[in-house]
Image (cartoon, helix red, strand yellow):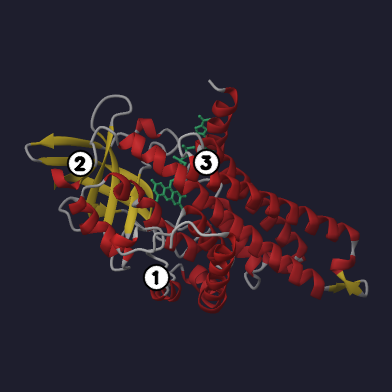
Amino acid sequence: MKAMDRDTYEQFRDNVRRLAVDKVAPHSAKVDATRSLPVESLKAFRDANLIGLPFPEEFGGQGGDLMAQVICIEEIARVCATSAVSLFTSWIVLDPLVRYGSKKLVEEIVYPVARAEKVAAWCLTEPKGGSDLAGVTTKAERKGDNWVLNGTKRFITNATWADWYMVLARTGEKRTFGIFAVHRDDPGVSFGAKEKKMGIRGSPTADVILDNVTIPDSRVVGDPLKGYDYMTIGLTNSRPVVAAEALGIAQGALDEAVKYTKERQQFGQPIARFQMIRGMIADMAIKVESSRAMLYRAVEMIDADPVQARAYASIAKTLCSDTAMSVTTDAVQLHGGYGYLEDYPVERMMRDAKITQIYEGTNQIQRLIIAKHVLQD
Ligand SMILES: Cc1cc2nc3c(=O)[nH]c(=O)nc-3n(C[C@H](O)[C@H](O)[C@H](O)COP(=O)(O)OP(=O)(O)OC[C@H]3O[C@@H](n4cnc5c(N)ncnc54)[C@H](O)[C@@H]3O)c2cc1C
């Protein structure tokens, strides 16, 4: 599946939506309540080869372009954000490896992940900071033919579940970093306790601790001095995917609000008849549709020139995630007291929406990137 025409994208969307409604949605409340991996969703993704969606066909994937990834995640997140995160994390983690990794490393890691036999995690953030990635202190030191890694990575999605950990570690002064492939079973790797989170509760998050982890030179992704550049390019591709997660959550909340306001009666009529409610629904739709338009525009720009489009990835991520927070909050409001209960999905959606304003670079950091682009400084 390469770049598709409009009809093919819509056909693909219909297929993913059907899968999401039939196989993902029935389990989303349970996944949230039990804070457990979305095993039913993962099986459905495996059966439909969605886990391999973005990976090149020669690596066992489908070769789906960024637009296909965005459509897929939007449709899954519409019914279950945890399932969307569990699907796309390995995609975005392995982007630098697919682009810059050696054939040997790609065969060892990308093939099994694309075939849904292994799982990957991205280790950037540290206890002292996630926004200032140039301040990362985890070190990789060359010793003979090996590299020795020391440091702690915080808030790592898929930690404990993942087999492979792509670690950003300092190899020199200032912005000199490498990306290193660390396996869960490498001596010196351990994990912190699983974090108890507000949302995306079925997705495991924990510290990854590296204590004199010694790995061969063949585990370096590309050039050990260019990891920061690889990561920056990777983020330009991953931010639209997180934006799609946010957009999906917002669309799901709007759908729930439409359904509820047409059913709920007050003062002898459905609350959807009241002008103030109609205004809220209209504002939610304006936010969702304009976010979708911006996201798809950003994807087209990234396809054309990823370096120039960096700020547009940030605009899409910021707009879609702010929309998700606003629309889910309004959806809870439109459900009245019932919106505050776990019985209705909007309560979960509002909690799930929040993370999209925080990870893959907070929205304050996105605004810094956007302002730099606009001011050209
Ligand atoms: C559930 C979850 C999953 C995650 N998954 C991963 C993962 O898989 N891999 C990974 O590496 N990381 C992951 N993260 C980490 C995430 O990317 C960071 O939490 C995020 O980048 C923010 O970093 P921080 O938490 O250290 O906040 P800080 O950087 O300490 O920021 C605190 C506040 O200050 C603001 N701020 C910071 N600097 C500036 C500035 N210059 N100007 C204005 N405001 C500023 C921030 O926007 C924020 O509001 C995850 C986090 C969570 C909660």
Q: Is disc 3 surrounded by few (<14), some (14 to 19) or many (20+) residues within 10 Å? A: some
- What amino acid type is highlighted by mark number 3? Thr
Of the two numbered discs 2 and 3 on the same chain, state the one appearing first in sequence: 2
On the picture, is 275 further left or further right than 88?
right
Q: Which residue carries the number 3 mark?
A: 362
Please say if the residues under marks 2 and 3 sit with CB atoms less than 8 Å apart. Answer: no
At which x and y percent is residue 312?
A: 56, 39
At which x and y percent is residue 294?
A: 63, 46
Quadrant housing residue 256: bottom right
- What amino acid type is highlighted by mark number 2? Leu
Label 3 CB-ligand 1 distance < 8 A: yes
At which x and y percent is residue 198?
A: 53, 57
- Mark 3 vs mark 1: give the one in front: 1
Q: Nearer the viewer, residue 84 or 102?
A: 102
- Mark 2 vs mark 1: give the one in front: 1
Q: Is disc 1 surrounded by few (<14), some (14 to 19) or many (20+) residues within 10 Å? A: some
On the picture, is 286 further left or further right than 204?
right
Q: Is residue 184 visible?
A: no
Of the two numbered discs 2 and 1 on the same chain, state the one appearing first in sequence: 1
**Residue occupying image coordinates x 27% and y 24%:** 173
Mark linked to residue 149: 2
How far apart are the alpha carbons under marks 2 and 1? 34 Å
**Residue occupying image coordinates x 41% and y 74%:** 39
Identity of the residue furthest to the top in this view: 377
At which x and y percent is residue 56?
A: 34, 58
Q: Is disc 2 surrounded by few (<14), some (14 to 19) or many (20+) residues within 10 Å? A: many
Q: Which residue carries the number 1 mark?
A: 49
Q: Secondary structure at mark 2?
A: strand
